[in-house]
Every structure is written in C-alpha cells, then in structure tokens.
Amino acid sequence: MERTFIAIKPDGVQRGLIAEIISRFERKGFKLVAIKLVVPSKEFAQKHYHDLKERPFFNGLCEFLSSGPVLAMVWEGEGVIKYGRKLIGATDPQKSEPGTIRGDLAVVVGRNIIHGSDGPETAKDEINLWFKPQELV
Ligand code: ATP
Ligand code: MG
C-alpha cells in the first residue's frame, strides 16, 4: 500500500497543532503507520531538503527545521502521497485554499507548519531517512 512521509515542523508543534493535523489525516481515512518526535540536527535537515540546496532560503529553512521538535510520521492509504499534499495545501499559505491545513492555520511560507513528500521516489527516500524499518507497523 502507498505510503508518504509527513512532518509537523517546529512551528506547528510549538503552536499546539499536532492533534488538529493528525485528526485531519485520520478523518480522511488514512492510516498512521509510524510516528515520533525528534529534534533533527542541521546536517539532517540539509539531507532532508537536499533538493533545495541551491535556493536562497535553504540555510534559513534548515536552521528552522532543526530549531525544535518535529513530529515525523508515515501515513498509508490509496493515493496518500498526492491527497496528503491536497490536505496540506499550497506551499505559500497566502495561496493555500481555505479548508487546507496551511490555508486554515498558517500565514507565511517560512512558517508553513507541515511537510509532505512530493512524489513516490521522495516518499521512499524520506521514509528511509527518518525511520528505521522496525519503527513502521
Ligand atoms: P515541503 O517540502 O515542506 O512539504 P513544499 O513541497 O510545499 O513544502 P518546497 O518547494 O519543497 O515546498 O519547499 C520546501 C519548504 O521551503 C517550504 O515548505 C517552505 O517552508 C520553504 N520555502 C519554499 N519557498 C520559500 C521561499 N520562497 N521563501 C522561504 N521559504 C520557502
Ligand atoms: Mg517539498
């Protein structure tokens, strides 16, 4: 069954949005198969966002991801990669539709509270980066 990597970033954890976000994925019908709270190192954040290393905001983004607890999760279900991104909404919360997580709960792109894998390959890589096989149920 299809799986994706979802992370609540430090701003989402700090703002107390864990239950709200998990409940949206649960109510949709997706299944939680792994979950843990971690403070990633900056080096780890750079690995996670390696595709963006040429972007001007890369350093700030990695600093931010490693600034506090992140809730790392794996969710499973038919179409979960694409539909998970739909639940999350557009990257820039100014452009995310109301009804999406970023649309309802965030204001600026540098504090958009949640990450979701953008395709099957990245989902596989990100799950392997963040979790050991025995951490998945
Ligand atoms: P994510 O990978 O976190 O799920 P995304 O796939 O919607 O987000 P990406 O293009 O992968 O968007 O960008 C990764 C993250 O980098 C964004 O979630 C955002 O926090 C940050 N980011 C993207 N564009 C900008 C920007 N122009 N300025 C500052 N931060 C940005
Ligand atoms: Mg992305």
Image (cartoon, rainbow, N blue to C red):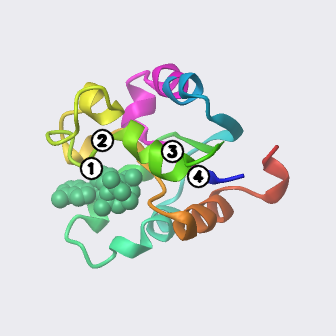
Q: Amino acid at mark 4?
A: Thr
| Residue in the foreground of this view, choosing between 69 and 29 | 29
Q: Is residue 8 left or right of residue 107?
A: right
Marks counted in the figure total 4
Marks 1 & 2, CB-CB < 8 Å contact? yes
Marks 4 & 2, CB-CB < 8 Å contact? no
Q: Earlier in the sequence, mark 4 or mark 2?
A: 4
From the Cβ of disc 2, is ligand 1 less than 8 Å away? yes
Give the residue number, with chain letter if any, for mark 2: 112
Q: Earlier in the sequence, mark 4 or mark 1?
A: 4
Q: Position of residue 124 (x, y in %)?
A: 63, 65
Q: Is residue 4 above or below residue 126?
A: above
Q: Position of residue 12 (x, y in %)?
A: 40, 32
Work out how far the residue at label 1 is from the one at label 2, CA to CA, in angstroms. Answer: 7 Å
Query: Which numbered disc, 1 or 2, marks the residue closer to the eye?
Result: 1
From the Cβ of disc 1, is ligand 1 less than 8 Å away? yes
Give the residue number, with chain letter if any, for mark 1: 91
Q: Is residue 96 left or right of residue 77?
A: left
From the Cβ of disc 3, is ligand 1 less than 8 Å away? yes
Q: Secondary structure at mark 1?
A: loop
Work out how far the residue at label 4 is from the one at label 2, CA to CA, in angstroms. Answer: 18 Å
Give the residue number, with chain letter if any, for mark 4: 4
Q: Secondary structure at mark 3?
A: strand
Work out how far the residue at label 3 is from the one at label 1, CA to CA, in angstroms. Answer: 14 Å
Q: Earlier in the sequence, mark 3 or mark 2?
A: 3
Residue under the image location 56 percent in, 65 percent down: 120
Q: How packed is label 3: few (under 14 Cα within 10 Å), some, or many (20 or more)?
A: many
Work out how far the residue at label 4 is from the one at label 3, CA to CA, in angstroms. Answer: 10 Å
Give the residue number, with chain letter if any, for mark 3: 7
Q: How packed is label 1: few (under 14 Cα within 10 Å), some, or many (20 or more)?
A: some
Q: Which mark is residue 39?
A: none
